[in-house]
Each structure stands twice: as C-alpha cells, then as structure tokens.
C-alpha cells in the first residue's frame, strides 16, 4: 500500500524542494501508515531552509500561523499539517516543558529523529519520492510489535514518555523491550501537571484496543504509584465464588477491556464508560473484609465515590464527566441488585432521575454493568450471559422509568397557585410530590398535589 498525501501538502513539499529544502512526513501518520491505520494528522519536518525562508515559501499557500514559533512549528491556514524545522531539545528543568529548543535546519534526519521517544515514531517518508527514512529500526519494531526507545540517554528527560509508552501499548497491542521497561521504571511522574497525565490516560482508555496492557505496564514499572487509587487495588482479594479471576486489580483490567469492546464512537459516552470501568471498584480496598470465611466489600459502591473524586480531581477531569463517572461508581451494581431485590417502581424512577441529573441513561448504566459482569471468569460471564441486565432494562421500559422521572411534574408555581406561602413547607411538599411521581408514574400535577397534601400539614395563605 503506497503512501500518499493531499495535493496541498504535496504542493508545499515541491515548493520547499524548489527552494532548496526537503520536506519529510514524520510522526504518527507514518507509523499509522505502516500499521494500516487511516490517519490524516500530517506533520512535515523541513530540512535545509531557515525558518524565515520557510515562512516565505509557505506564504504562497495562504496565511502562515506560528503555533509554536519557539519550537519552529508553523501552519498554513486551511491546510491540515504542522510544519516544523528539525531541532535539539536540551533539558533545563523539571516537567514536560523544561527544555531549551535549538532549531537547526542543517541536521540530518537520523540526528533529528533522536529526540523522538520511540523508534516507531521516528520514521519518515519523503512525500515526493516515497523514500522511507528509518535510521533507528522503527519498521522492524512495528513488525515485531515491540516498543523501544530511540535514545536511552535522552528518553528519561521527559517523564511523560512513560505514559505515552503505556498508551501506545494499549492502542497497538505491543510490548516494551527490556530496555524501555527499565527506562520507564526509573521515571518520576511527579513533575507532570495533571492535565498532561489526563491526556495520556484518555488516549489509553479511548483508543486502546486492550487498555489492560497499558495499565499493567504502569504496574510492572511501578509508575502506578503516581495513581494511588489505582495502586490501592493491586493485591486486594475478592470472593472466589463471584470473582474467580482474582484480585480487584485483575478484575479491573478485564473490565476495562470489556468496556473497550462496548465503545460506540460517541466520545463523551465512551469517556464516561471507560473511566467508570476504571474507577468502579475504587471502594473495595477500604471496605474489603473477611467474614465467616468469605471475602466481602460492603458498601464499596458508595465508599468508592470519594477516591474517584480525588483521582479525577488531580487529573483535572472536566466536572461534568467526573459527575458521570462517580454516578457509575455509586450505582454500578444497581442493575443486578434491582432485579434480585425486586425493586419498586419508585426505585427505578428515582435511579433514572439520579442518572438523568448528570446526563446519563439507564442504558448507559447497563453498558457499564455488562462490562463489569463480563470482566470476571464465572460460568455465566464466560458464556457471555448477563440476564440481569436485560431484565433490568425490560422492567425499566415497562415502568416508563425514564419518561416519568425525566423532570418534576409539580413545580413551585403549582403550589403558589394554590395559595401556599413561600417557605420551607413548599420544599417539603415538593419532595413529597417527587416521591409520589416516582412511585406512581403519575403525570398530572393536580392529582400528585392532592395526594401529597393529603399527608401533610402545609401552610396556606389565609
């Protein structure tokens, strides 16, 4: 399969060549090409031209935008490509940005590629001739499905590379070579801002074919210590009757892989599902006890909310997503429990309301519960059977749970129209109206109010 670029990018490459330079396509789009993955996020590295001359050439194609002039990164408005010069990065301080960048158009490709993290990301292609530049053996590593550092001396300068290795492992089902494993095990992620760690975890969970590979890599390299809520699950036992697969950590790895298979392509829904799968048992480390010869984790759903909030907060997770994830943590056992305990109509409608308040539906909850159920090695899970999930959705449909719980039928204005005085009694009556609505499914405000008032001592304006 030949490598091709858009006509606009090819025209830019030819104009650069006519001016005495050479444009090479680098980075993820080249890696993805050799993996057979469609990608259009082009990066061009330009050799042989100073930045002023490069800007002059690019100006023929449209408005030139400097998105990182200090890093020599330019764009042409309307053309989807980052265009940069080769550079050297010198470490000057802690953190992902603690570097001095030296642009050097005279560098050759092999030297310029040394600043990249992994050999699979250090391959280039000439878009005019099709020549492949692979001085560090990236294509061979792709074929072997091995991740390897380009330069062991400079790799540790950016601690974010440990997380990047983990997410590439999850996305491409690759393994780290011993050298990379040792390099990552020596990294200190404490210099990274939460936002950068968040971005890499999002890629691991949202793009990972098998997210468990990346997460387990974090464990074996001890990088999991920078995520204490995750590390706390390692080694925590579970009752073998319900979890013959092993510990809470081992179960979680299975669950995130099952959740990955249930992604729909809706980014927001998939993010809440994947982080819900990752965090759903955060309460077990603190609640697990041995009772009467059995391992139990009483109330671990509710106890998992606080560590999930702490974990997501440090990563600067968007608040709306954090609310959805914590709702998943709190209610992840509800589908099975509601069927087993023959929950009341009010219970179904109240649950639908609670989920709806954070933008979730009962279907979303069952999707997470399905991943949780299949992420174990019980006979029914191995047989891919989850009857409780189907029964839960069927019962919720019969009760029109989401339609009846979507919003309050009775509002404050309805009570004021009946002559009630503003104040605490109105709040109490509204709570009673909500409970009646959830229990009965009634949709007529007057009927609900009548039932609520029949059991209250509400104050009226005389």
Image: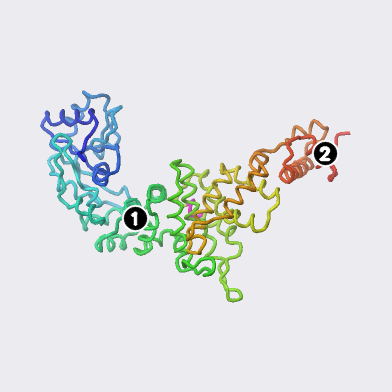
Residue 63 appears in which quarter of the rendering? Answer: top left
Magenta stretch prevailing secondary structure: helix
Q: Split into 4 quadrants, where in the image is the C terminus?
A: top right
Label 1 element class: helix
- The residue tagged 2 is 450
Residue identified by numbered label 1 = 166
Please provide the residue range marked out in magenta.
309-313
In percent of width and height, residue 340 lies at 64, 58
Q: Residue furthest right?
A: 462
* Disc 1 crowd, CA 10 A, few/some/many (<14, 14-19, 20+): many
**Residue in view at x 15 percent, y 45 percent:** 133
* Residue at x 42% of width, y 55% of height: 257
Numbered disc in front, either 2 or 1: 2
Q: Can residue 215 be found in the magenta stretch?
A: no
Find residue 177 and report its horizontal and vertical position in percent.
Answer: 25, 61
Left or right? Give the position of 98 relative to 225.
Answer: left
Nearer-the-camera pick, 360 or 241: 241
Q: Is residue 162 left or right of residue 395?
A: left
Q: Is residue 88 visible?
A: yes
Relative to residue 446, is residue 156 drawn left or right?
left
The furthest residue to the front: 383
Q: Would you say the residues marked 2 and 1 are in contact, meaning their CB atoms lie under 8 Å apart?
A: no
Characterize the local packing of mark 2: few (<14), some (14-19) or many (20 or more) Cα atoms within 10 angstroms: few
Q: Earlier in the sequence, mark 2 or mark 1?
A: 1
Q: Position of residue 214 (x, y in %)?
A: 36, 56
Q: Quadrant of the N terminus?
A: top left
Q: CA distance from mark 2 to mark 1?
A: 60 Å
Task: Estimate the x, y position of residue 309 in percent, counting from the top left.
Answer: 52, 53
């Amino acid at each position: 399969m030949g490598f091709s670029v858009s006509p606009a990018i090819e025209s830019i490459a030819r104009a650069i060549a006519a001016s005495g330079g050479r444009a090479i396509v680098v980075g993820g789009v080249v890696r993805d090409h050799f993996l057979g993955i469609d990608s259009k996020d082009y990066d061009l590295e330009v050799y042989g031209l100073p930045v002023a001359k490069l800007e002059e050439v690019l100006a023929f194609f449209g408005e030139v935008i400097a998105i990182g002039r200090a890093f020599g990164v330019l764009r042409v408005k309307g053309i989807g490509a980052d265009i940069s010069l080769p550079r050297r990065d010198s470490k000057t301080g802690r953190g992902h940005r603690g570097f001095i960048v030296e642009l050097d158009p005279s560098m050759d490709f092999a030297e310029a590629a040394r600043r990249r993290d992994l050999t699979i990301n250090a391959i280039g292609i000439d878009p005019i001739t099709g020549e492949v530049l692979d001085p560090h053996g990236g294509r061979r590593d792709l074929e072997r499905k091995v991740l390897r550092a380009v330069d062991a001396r400079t790799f540790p300068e950016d601690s974010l590379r440990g997380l990047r290795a983990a997410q590439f492992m999850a996305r491409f089902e690759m393994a780290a070579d011993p050298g990379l494993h040792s390099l990552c095990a020596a990294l200190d992620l404490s210099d990274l801002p939460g936002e950068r760690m968040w971005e890499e975890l999002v890629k691991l969970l949202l793009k990972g074919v098998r997210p468990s590979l990346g997460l387990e890599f974090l464990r074996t390299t001890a990088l999991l210590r920078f995520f204490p809520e995750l590390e706390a699950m390692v080694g925590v036992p579970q009752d073998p009757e319900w979890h013959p697969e092993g510990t809470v950590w081992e179960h979680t790895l299975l669950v995130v892989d099952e959740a990955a298979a249930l992604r729909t392509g809706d980014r927001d829904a998939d993010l809440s599902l994947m982080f819900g799968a990752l965090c759903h048992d955060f309460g077990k480390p603190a609640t697990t006890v041995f009772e009467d010869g059995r391992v139990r984790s009483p109330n671990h759903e509710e106890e998992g909310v606080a560590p999930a909030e702490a974990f997501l907060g440090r990563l600067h997770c968007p608040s709306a997503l954090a609310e959805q994830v914590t709702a998943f943590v709190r209610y992840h056992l509800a589908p099975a429990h509601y069927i087993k305990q023959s929950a009341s109509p009010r219970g179904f409608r109240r649950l639908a309301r609670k989920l709806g308040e954070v933008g979730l539906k009962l279907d979303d909850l069952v999707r997470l519960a399905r991943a949780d159920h299949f992420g174990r090695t019980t006979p029914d899970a191995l047989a891919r059977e989850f009857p409780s999930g189907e029964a839960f959705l069927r019962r919720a449909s019969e009760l029109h749970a989401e339609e009846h719980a979507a919003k309050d039928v009775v509002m404050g204005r309805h009570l004021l129209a009946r002559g009630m005085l503003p104040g605490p009694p109105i709040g109490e009556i509204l709570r009673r109206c909500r409970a009646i609505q959830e229990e009965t499914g009634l949709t007529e405000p007057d009927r609900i109010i009548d039932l609520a008032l029949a059991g209250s001592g509400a104050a009226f304006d005389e």
